[in-house]
Amino acid sequence: MKKRIKIVDALRGEQVGQPVTVMGWVRSFRNNQFIALNDGSCFGSLQIVVDIDKLGLETAKRLTAGAAISVDGLLIASQGKGQTVEVTAQQLEILGDCPADEYPLQLKNRPSLEYLREIAHLRFRTNTFGAIFRVRHALSFAIHQFYNQRGFVCMHSPIITGSDAEGAGEMFRVTTLPLDKLPKTADGKVDFKQDFFEKSTHLTVSGQLEAELAALALGQVYTFGPTFRAENSNTSRHLAEFWMIEPEVAFADLTDNMNLAEDMLKYVIEYALTHCREDLDFLNQRFAEEDKSKPVAERAEMGLLEKLQFCLKEPFQRLTYTEAIEILKNSTPNKKGKFKYPIKAWGADLQSEHERYLVEKHFKKPVILTDYPMEIKAFYMRQNNDGKTVAAMDILFPGIGEIIGGSQREERLEKLKQRMLDMHIPIEEMQWFLDTRRFGSCPHAGFGLGFERLILFITGMTNIRDVIPFPRFPGSATF
Ligand code: 4AD
Ligand code: MG
């Protein structure tokens, strides 16, 4: 194919005065003269100026929104307002028509996010989703860059797992057994010996346990992969398939873990602010428009960009679960019975209404809660000396709630084994995990960042189904 210049490069204007070839999709065609052409390389569109007499009416009619075209012309400094450069077309070829009467993405009636979710195969073409998925890419790159700069090894943890010990959520089974004719053992149970892996397997809910194995040899590792949870949570914060970043560090305690998490979050927010400016400016404007349509009491205190910048400036608020419970117990909504789940005593699991109160009303900044009651946390978290809490941490973000969950890990073999016994975790099947504690165990810590929750925060979107290309949630696995 002919060599084309990308629109992002054309708009930089360095090639003004030169002949160029550009290809893209028509966003609009107005006054029989101006095409707004977008090729996805950036938010902006390039203006193409055509001479209708040269072009012919037949071709002009085919310049509908969504049509793919190739244009040869001269890149010049623009005379008009609203753009610095434009292309005067010398030759225009329609690569793919887009019939206006059938195309669902017409500029006139801005489609709702709900509708766009139903046509997720086309929503990439809108301004909003173009911006979101460029930001998603930038964040993924920034995360790898952050860990690479710090000497972490990227570790690909398995997607199919034979261990179901994490207890992070309901799992999806993986099997090749015929569902209509399941082989049975003598005592009537499903005979997984005849299954592909000769055992029962699932999609992973977390790469952490495998990351621990690697960290206890490579020192600092992280996973960045898809994870799966079959919990029936039909919320704007949960997906059945989501991507998680899980660093795991040897010779590190809970404070090191909190520092790493805070540094990482600030690094990637800063990265987005410097590298995704055009997309974020658009999302900022979008956020402001959405906000205006809400009742005054529900409006955000800060704009999107303001909120992101604010997060960089302030250290996150760190406090223990016990301190948080005191604040919540004495809070106005608790006293006035406004919480759906009133906080009565120490030990209660925090609901999202409590997390949001702490972050949005009380501290008005990101919060790191530590040292949760042992009973409400996973078996692998390090037991504190008080005998009732563990060295856990959750990071809570405004508008999101929990964005990160992690802990220092229990590195003492006997304590870990006892906790597993108490929680009915099959120790025999977990010998590989316990081996790390048998052979050269050491203090170590890690956490998991939900990638889509991070993107939600940075793009200012409100539904997690809009920040992953093809969301999976109860009742839906289209595309
Ligand atoms: O708190 P979680 O369940 O922690 C773990 O899985 C640990 N193994 C992490 C670790 O220590 N290595 O999940 C971690 C994060 C949450 O804070 C949240 O951001 C995100 O993953 N998350 C989800 N995101 C989207 N949809 C869901 N259903 C999610 N469940 C958790
Ligand atoms: Mg959690």
Image: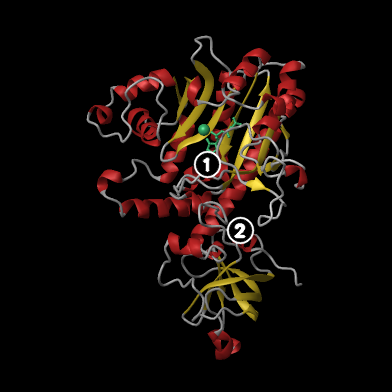
Q: Is residue 17 above or below residue 357?
A: below
User: Could you tell me which secondary element the residue under label 1 belongs to?
Assistant: helix
Which numbered disc, 2 or 1, marks the residue that appears first in the sequence?
2
Q: Is residue 150 visible?
A: no
* Residue 346 horizontal/vertical position (percent): 38, 19
On the picture, is 338 further left or further right than 114? Answer: left
Question: Are the residues at dot 2 and dot 1 in contact (C-beta closer than 8 Å)?
Answer: no
Who's the residue at 65% across and 75% down the image? 71
**Nearest the eye: 39 or 140:** 140
* Residue 51 horizontal/vertical position (percent): 56, 84
Who's the residue at 46% across and 52% down the image? 283
- Ligand 1 contact, mark 2 (Cβ < 8 Å): no
Q: Amino acid at mark 2?
A: Arg
Q: Quadrant of ligand 1?
A: top right
User: Could you tell me which secondary element the residue under label 2 belongs to?
Assistant: helix
- Ligand 1 contact, mark 1 (Cβ < 8 Å): yes
Protein image colouring: secondary structure
Question: For residue 411, which numbered disc appears in the image?
Answer: none
On the picture, is 77 further left or further right than 462? Answer: right
- Quadrant for residue 202, please give it: top right
Question: For residue 12, which numbered disc appears in the image?
Answer: 2
Q: Is residue 195 above or below residue 267?
A: below
On the picture, is 455 further left or further right than 213? Answer: left
Circle 1 sits on which residue?
Answer: 454
